[in-house]
Image (spheres, helix red, strand yellow):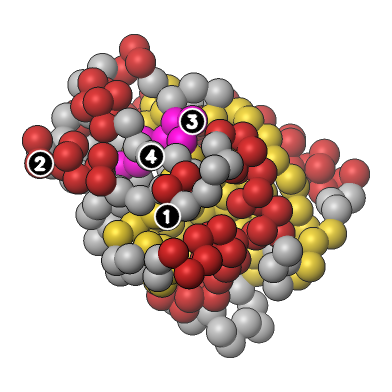
Amino acid sequence: MEAVSFGYSRNSAAKNMALDEALKELSEKTGRTYIRFYDFERDSVILSTSDDPSSIRDRSKVEVTRRETGGKTIYVGENTLAYSVSGPLRGDSKVSGPEALHRKYSSVALSGISEIIGNSAKVSLGGVYAINVDGMPIAGHAQSIGLGHSFLYHGVVAVSRWNSKRIRDVMDFPESDYEKIGMLPALSDFTKERGDTGKRRLMENMLRRVDAKSPSDEEKREAEELASRFCSEKYMDEEWIEGRGRKLKTGARFCLLYPD
């Protein structure tokens, strides 16, 4: 896959969602595919486009925003590495809908994860945009296919184990979910590399599957300008975060456990 790499950054949840949307819009204009990797400045809850925020019991411990993509609520922290791919749809016969998009672009993360795990476990595509290790999700994804000619495909990979106690303090999920969250696999189960070292290895593995080019100064400038506008006007906006004026789903479940 050919792509322009915007590298790695650590931002607020609102800025990260704004950058993802900015690169989707930039792809609409340029016809180029963009990939980026990112972390969050603090633990965050990212609501899907249709999640009711009533599932968040303590907002003082996290940043909260809402994304443009579907799926379910995701809690992100130091244990995760996030990434996104934005690209054009026109003329791509391999991308005809969400399932085809997932099959094509999940291969970058799936190969990077497989290189770390080796023969220790089976890595495969799971149901509804997951990547599984021995049948349990280690990565989850969501996507948006625009009315124009571009898409956004983004996801998180568990580099180390989920902290179910911390998630319980913040999120009001069914009690049975917390035990299951603690049982989900992570890359740290299969390697001695931890924290930023583990994330760096995963990024390097994934980028080996990409014919990566550097963005031009114009692309960097335009992406930053778009992201700054989207961040202030949308992803930090209370009306957007609360989902006012839209039909929302209650009864949230943890994204990787219930990806459908």
- Residue at (63, 30) in percent of width and height: 10
User: Above or below — where is 100 with respect to 197?
Assistant: below
Query: Which three-letter amino acid code belongs to the residue tagged 3?
Result: Glu
Query: Which three-letter amino acid code belongs to the residue tagged 1?
Result: Ala
Residue 176: give its label: 2
Q: In the rendered image, which quarter is residue 70 located in?
A: bottom left
Name which of mark 3 and mark 2 comes first in the sequence: 3
Q: Find disc 4 in the rendering and name its residue.
A: 161
Query: Which three-letter amino acid code belongs to the residue tagged 2?
Result: Ser
Q: Quadrant of the N terminus?
A: bottom right
Q: Given contact means CB atoms under 8 Å apart, are the residues at marks 4 and 3 in contact?
A: no
Q: Is residue 160 visible?
A: yes
Name which of mark 1 and mark 2 comes first in the sequence: 1
Q: Nearer the viewer, mark 4 or mark 1?
A: 4
Q: CA distance from mark 4 to mark 1?
A: 12 Å
Residue segment shown in magenta: 73-79
Q: Is residue 53 left or right of residue 223?
A: left
Name which of mark 1 and mark 3 comes first in the sequence: 3
Q: CA distance from mark 4 to mark 3?
A: 10 Å
Instruction: Estimate the x, y position of residue 153 in percent, counting from the top left.
Output: 52, 59
Name which of mark 4 and mark 3 comes first in the sequence: 3
Helix, strand or loop for disc 4: loop
Q: CA distance from mark 3 to mark 2?
A: 23 Å
Q: Is residue 225 left or right of residue 214?
A: left
Q: Find disc 1 in the rendering and name its residue.
A: 139
Q: Between residue 48 and residue 229, name the one nearer to us.
A: 48
Q: CA distance from mark 2 to mark 4?
A: 17 Å
Q: CA distance from mark 1 to mark 3?
A: 15 Å
